[in-house]
Image: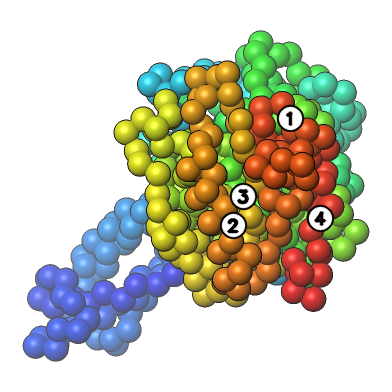
Amino acid sequence: MFRVEASLILTRHAGRTARPDDRSLPHRRHRIRLQNSNLRVERIMPHLSPSASDYKRQVRSALRAAAFAFAVTFSAPSAALAGDQSWVGTWMASPQPIWGSEFSFPTKIPASVKDQTFRQVVRVSLGGSRIRLVFSNAYGDKPMRIGGASVGIAGKGNALETGTLRKMTFGGKGEIVVPPGAPAVSDPVNIAFDEQGKLAISLYLPDETPLTTFHWDGRQTAWFGKGDQTEADNFTATRTTDARVFLSDVLVNAPNEGAVVVIGDSITDGNGATVDADTRWPDFLARRLAPQRIAVLNAGISGGRLLQDKMGVNVAARLKRDVLSQPNVKAAIVLIGINDISWPGTDFAPDQTVPSAEEMIAGYKQLIALAEANKIRLIGATLPPFEGALSGTPLGNYYHTDKDALRQEINRWIRESGAFDAIIDFDVVLRDPDHPARIDPAFDSGDHLHPGDAGNRAMADALDLDALLGR
């Protein structure tokens, strides 16, 4: 059981609400307290006038509206558990807002669904015997009704291993309405699973539900199916995708264990890695850290940028949700900035100008300050080489020598400034020794921008785990 508490002190005089610092009138003061989902109005001043009961009812009514707003602003997926030392993230996918037809990439999911179940498979970092799921309505503009959810050990394809299915509940109920902008954290459920194991998670959406919150580059096959199939071991699919829908976190009950969050763009998200193979560089890092009981959470968003929004909000805007509010975070790694440098002037950002080094460095310094204020180690990563990136595509002007000069200036600052708690030099790890502006052909996925499986393994193997964890 986790506990969330917030309070607000209001004052009242002669039938109106006054500011607590207004000393011109005698006040009757009340504390509004929210404990988990229970609302309380507590009297601080001992004497109430005959009209106080009406006032109390008005306050309670207003507070229910305030509680809705509280839920909306409490949009960090695991914020409710951030101070609970018994829970830690074992998997995540950073939520993104959907985009319209004006953007060239297809979303790979329907605009909305009704009376459908979505089943997706996740490979966890840490194993355990008790989990919670988090579903996000972060970018919804209306309440979303979850009609049912379940989890089981993934079997072959979209099937579950027999006897492992567990129904999820939310506050003891089988369904929940999630406010716009808010997450839904399930009740704990007992299920035994191994580190680096795979879970299949099913979500039933009974109403017409716009798919406004998703994760575009999931790198894992997922299935849509008609009706409520949350209790089905074998899933009957009508459509597949490799995007994520609504699912944002899997939390495991693992006292005194921790997590490392990797926040970045498509290189971290796994673009270029083999689909269904779990060969992103954070996946390889998770295998290295699992024996030390440290999870790795992938907060990469393909198309993500340091300073601008598009395929997701800028990093500073999501740092609290994706890093600072995750429970038991030991450190974070940030690999971001190549899209800030290279998108301007392309079809993705035709009217934008390339930021200056000073603007980008100021952005990094903000991340450093936020991490420092929350006592989280922040490891900076240099930007890998990208000469020839995306040549022969509509983004053939992604690379330019001037853009590469800016990348190298940023890398010098990351290496020499001492601003980060530690650094990892992915530029050196991935570059071709004979042609340093270009990614090593052995590590190239083929587009000269994203590493393939071998490159991802090299990135994870290059990390000094003692420096990462501050030991």
Whether label 4 touches label 3, CB < 8 Å: no
Count of residue discs: 4
Q: Secondary structure at mark 2?
A: helix
> What amino acid does circle 1 point to?
Ser
Indicate the position of residue 101 as horizontal and vertical percent values.
40, 19
Label whose residue precedes the other's in the sequence (2 or 4): 2
> What amino acid does circle 2 point to?
Asn
Q: Is residue 150 visible?
A: no
Foreground disc of the pair 2, 4: 2
Gap between marks 3 and 2, in whole Å? 6 Å
Q: Residues within 10 Å of mark 1 (few under 14, many from 20)?
A: many
Indicate the position of residue 110 as horizontal and vertical percent values.
52, 18
Q: Quadrant of the C terminus?
A: bottom right
- On the image, numbered disc 3 is attached to which residue? 383
Residue 260 is drawn in which quadrant?
bottom right
- Closer to the camera in the image, 459 or 216: 459
* Residue at the front extreme, as displayed: 434
- Closer to the camera in the image, 355 or 10: 355
- On the image, numbered disc 4 is attached to which residue? 462
Gap between marks 1 and 3, in whole Å? 16 Å
